[in-house]
Image (cartoon, grey):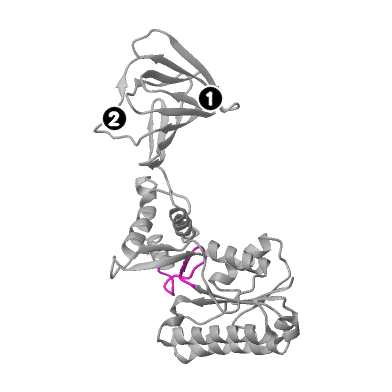
Amino acid sequence: MKILITGAHGFIGSNLLYQLRNDGFNDIITFNHDNTFDELAADLAQADFVFHLAGINRPKDPKDFYAGNRDLTTKIVEILTKQAQRHVPVLLASSIQADLDNDYGKSKKAAETAVFAYGQQTQTPVYVFRLSNLFGKWGRPNYNSVVATFCYNLARDLPIKVNDPNHQIVLNYIDDVVNTFISVMKSGTQATDKYLSVPNEHPITLGELAAKLTAFAKNRQTLVMPSLATDLDKELYGTYLSYLPDDDLAYPLNKKSDKRGWLAEFIKSTANGQIFISTTHPGITRGNHWHQTKTEKFLVLSGNGVVHLRKVGTDKVLSYPVDGTHPQPVDIPTGYVHNIENTGNTDMITLFWASEIFDPDHPDTYYEEV
């Protein structure tokens, strides 16, 4: 199958192009704003399927809405109509704004009408998607995506502006859009007179959106990771990270050193506790305390040691040898005094997980020798 993508350099186009390649489609033709109509005609003569994604969103002159949305689409279907015997399907990326009485909406509506007419006249499958507010990697900030703008600004410590925090929008994640488009192409479903939408739409207020993204931006300072329980949470977090500057992907941790070695907190979660890492010098023992409610896991990544445990009120000591060459987490139950001793000749590196974030006002830590 030879696939033509118009607007391949754009937000949807670039994501679609790379996913098609991931799926094994390598015979892809791209048409962008710097190509000519003659090139377009030649491209259409080869295409077996057309993803028409090119369009104008924010021109300096309102007339450009019609040139970039209505007229380009009309030109495409006119060329394809002359090749009607080939029945080349067309998928159009339109907008929920096509019903609005403004130049952008009217130009999009005209493009939809042209595609539907082509489908009916030639009895060819056409697919007109009315998309909501798109977000995801490679979106252009300060253009037509509030998510892209918020992410870009927050990643650079720039302010974000929310005029009405209660205003609700509907978000479409770019991967859902792309996967839906590809699925439609593969299925060959006939759809000549209906507007289509992408599954997994996410209603959210601007206030909620700003709060989520702001919390993600603060993670490096607080180390607290907001909930990623929903698909939207995970998608927004991945999108936020994609807007970090290239020279700002790494960040320092607060490393606390003493005669035993050093310790640094890595990440925290109100729902899933916290993770921290430490080095322990040879012959040094860390711990000698127990917890009423907090549980932990110890995982030695490098070096050799022993985890000792003793149930409070008893004399029996349990010993679990640990070493970095055979990773083996050790669970620390509640009510067990515990420590970890470096028995090797090099620094021991240990990863710790605790079931709750450490609260200095309620540490739930009671010192006692194993």
Taking the spot 37% from the left edge, 9% from the top edge, the residue there is: 314
Q: Residue under circle 1?
A: 346
Q: Position of residue 62 (x, y in %)?
A: 44, 90
**Nearest the camera: 126 or 178?**
126
- Inspect the image, locate mark 2, and give the three-letter code of the amino acid beneath it: Pro
Q: Residues within 10 Å of mark 2 (few under 14, many from 20)?
A: few
Q: Residue farthest to the left? A: 361
Q: Residues within 10 Å of mark 1 (few under 14, many from 20)?
A: some
Task: Count how many numbered circles sit on residues in the image.
Answer: 2
**Circle 2 sits in a helix, a strand or a loop, which is it?**
loop
Upstream in the sequence, badge 2 or badge 1?
1
Quadrant of the rendering where the N terminus is positioned:
bottom right
Q: Residue farthest to the bottom? A: 63
Q: Position of residue 32 (x, y in %)?
A: 61, 80
Quadrant of the rendering where the C terminus is positioned:
top left
Q: Which range is magenta?
A: 131-146
CA gap, disc 2 to disc 1? 31 Å
**Is 363 on the left-hand or right-hand side of 103?**
left
Q: Residue under circle 2?
A: 363
